[in-house]
Amino acid sequence: MNVYLDYNATSKLRPEAITGMEKVMRLCGNSSSVHRFGRLSRRAVEESREALADAVNASHDEVVFTSGGTESNNFALLGSRRKIIASSIEHDSVLQHVDEYAKIRVNSDGVIDLFHLEELLKNEESSVVVSVMVANNETGVIQPIEKVLELCRRYDAWLHCDGVQALGKIPISFSSLGVDMMSLSAHKLGGPQGIGALVIRDGVSLSPISVGGGQERGQRAGTENIIGIGGFGAVCETIGSSLEVSESLLKMRDNIEKRFVEIAPDIAIYGKESPRLANTSCIGLPGIKNEVQVMALDLSGVAVSSGSACSSGKIKPSHVLVAMGANSQSAECAIRISLGWDTSTSDCESLIKSWETLARSRVEHAFHQPTVA
């Protein structure tokens, strides 16, 4: 058995992405060179830029390619040269730049506290950029970006959104949302790792954080990763079909949660009362730490995670779950299950069967524990 259910960490490569990369791999020119070979490479880059822009309803000139979501987040925040306010459940690449008092609270369902955001904006005298992710990588909870934007506009703040987990899972229209910047990444969608983009609204000026060349219209120095860009562009053309599978993923996800509750009624399903990505479930099994669950499932041939892949090696509770009000002990017992474009019902049945064995062993272990007077 070989079941992969960790798509929020990285997706399996889609065949279209592989085809797109193979096509670009046959080119040999530097995309900044003016000769024929360079022009062919430049054309490939611009075709992919157009594909990404079309996928998120942005203009061609608003797309800047980066090495991934982490660089895009850093570029948006550091390049803004503004004071940063961010939700307390953001990716670490955002939170590393945020003072503790400037973190926006979320409620127990993982949704941003708009009253707290307004309070922070009211008390800030300097220019501000607010960073709120579209959908959380651990719980899948979708944030009310339109309401966040209303507050940002009221207080003359910029709004940056980490859209990495949302791309291909829910419809995204950069122009309709009206946000100032949005971070994206290919490998959550079925594209290659090591390539992403920052979409920057026309009129928003950022200071480059990577200098030394004129690439990406002077906004990001360094020779473009045309192989990665080719894969990104190709997978962007599959977004329509990605959105179409959301309904089937939702049915599979809901069935997993229903069956888990039947097996162990005391589990916690984080964010279940909020709008969530159809593919994501964050489940806490009291009494068994997440790393034990992940290893046991892995031994049975099922891959899930204990949270963000960027943080999975750290021995500490999830900051997302703690921000939602979970205590450290509960947060240490949560795993993330994330389905993807080729997940099948048989994959889900394998997960349920393996997890049931794990949950039953917890009950048996508790039953045989000696009583302490």
Image (tube, rainbow, N blue to C red):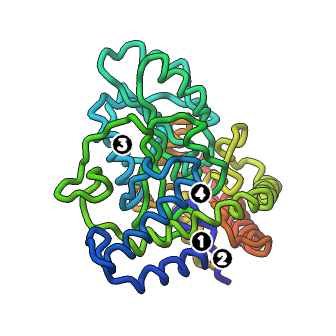
Q: CA distance from mark 4 to mark 3?
A: 30 Å
Residue type at tag 3? Ala
Tell me if 85 is positioned left or right of 232 in this view.
left
Q: Residue 348: x, y in percent?
A: 75, 69
**As drawn, which residue projects farthest toward the left?**
212
Q: Secondary structure at mark 2?
A: strand
Q: Which residue carries the number 1 mark?
A: 303
Tell me the number on the disc at residue 335: 4
Say whether marks 3 and 1 touch (CB < 8 Å).
Answer: no
Sequence order check, earlier mark of 4 and 3? 3
Q: Residue at x 50, y 48 (%)?
A: 59
Sequence order check, earlier mark of 3 and 1? 3
Q: Residue at x 49, y 16 (%)?
A: 154
Q: Residue at x 38, y 72 (%)?
A: 226
Q: Secondary structure at mark 4?
A: strand
Q: Residues within 10 Å of mark 3 (few under 14, many from 20)?
A: many
Q: Residues within 10 Å of mark 2 (few under 14, many from 20)?
A: some
Closest to the camera, between mark 3 and mark 1, is 3
